[in-house]
Image (cartoon, rainbow, N blue to C red):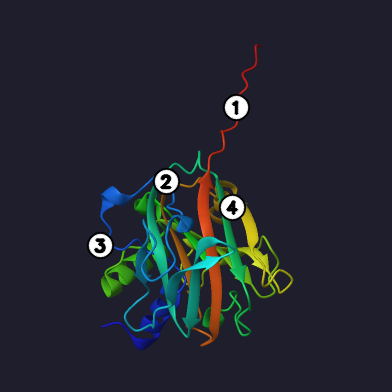
Amino acid sequence: MLRASFAAAIFTLLAGCAAVPDNIPQEIALPYVRNFSANSAGDGVPTGWRPWGVNRFKSPTEYRLVKEDGRTVVRARATASASGLIHPLDLDSSVYRLLHWHWKVDELIAKADNTQKNTEDSPVRLVISFDGDMSKLDFSDQMFFDQIKAFTGQQLPYATLMYIWENRVAKGTIIPNRHTSRIKMVVAESGREKLGTWQEQTQNIYDDFRRAFGEMPGRIISIGIMTDTDNTGANVHAYYGDIAFQRVAPPRTVFSSD
């Protein structure tokens, strides 16, 4: 039987990572992300996306399609809660290197600090999961993956990269996960200066992955959004606009005539 302290560690970890649920049929994995703006405002899950629950002991965050500036977006409302929406994908990360999105945060989570495991909350997260050779995991990561699968029934992806809005940590900072080396957070925005207005973001996920993990990324197998306040118990709402992976031609190899 798992000790209570280990169970608590798993719950903390799962508040900040996206495992691909086993009940998502493989055939709906797409080479692009379905736009939120293609949906009508109202109840229901955006086309191509599925609810993703962290675990049955946590309250779910509420996600709703709403109109903002004439476009349909997703509004997230979290009250001491953690859950997300996930979209299965099948993308070559060496080609689709850029991630482009819009998000809006009206207020930060006062007590959140993603460098500390007990206050690891964010008003917005984009979570990208990558495939890879599980046999390359070191012993401690393999043990942790096996324990999580036994405890939750969910298989963690080979690697997970998250983009978050932090309170004070500098943009571009990579924050490691406290439990496994296979999950890293990248601070895409920080501080209060840009609160209350839509922000357009573009990140080179290929370069960020190499910087975070020290290796080439595998195929992209899912993307998720998550607003979570389960560790701090706060109330927060935020908005997500359309998300797209953009193609970048790989560098050309120049051969010398010598």
The answer to which quarter of the image holds residue 255 is top right
Q: Amino acid at mark 3?
A: Asn
From the image, state whether disc 2 or disc 3 is nearer to you: 3
Give yes or no for contact between labels 3 and 1 (Cβ–Cβ under 8 Å).
no
Q: Residue 33, image x and y in percent?
A: 44, 51
Disc 4 on helix, strand or loop?
A: helix
Query: Mark 2 vs mark 3: which is more N-terminal?
Result: 3
From the image, state whether disc 3 or disc 1 is nearer to you: 3
Q: Residue 76, image x and y in percent?
A: 49, 73
The correct choice, above or below, for 201 with respect to 257 in the image is: below
Q: Amino acid at mark 1?
A: Arg
Disc 2 on helix, strand or loop?
A: loop
Please name the residue that numbered disc 4 is placed on. 208
Query: Mark 2 vs mark 1: which is more N-terminal?
Result: 2
Q: Residue at x 62, y 52 (%)?
A: 202
Q: Residue at x 53, y 54 (%)?
A: 213
Please name the residue that numbered disc 1 is placed on. 252
Q: Residue furthest top?
A: 258
Q: Which mark is residue 23?
A: 3
Neighbourhood count class around disc 2 (C-alpha, 10 Å): few under 14, some 14–19, many 20 upward: some
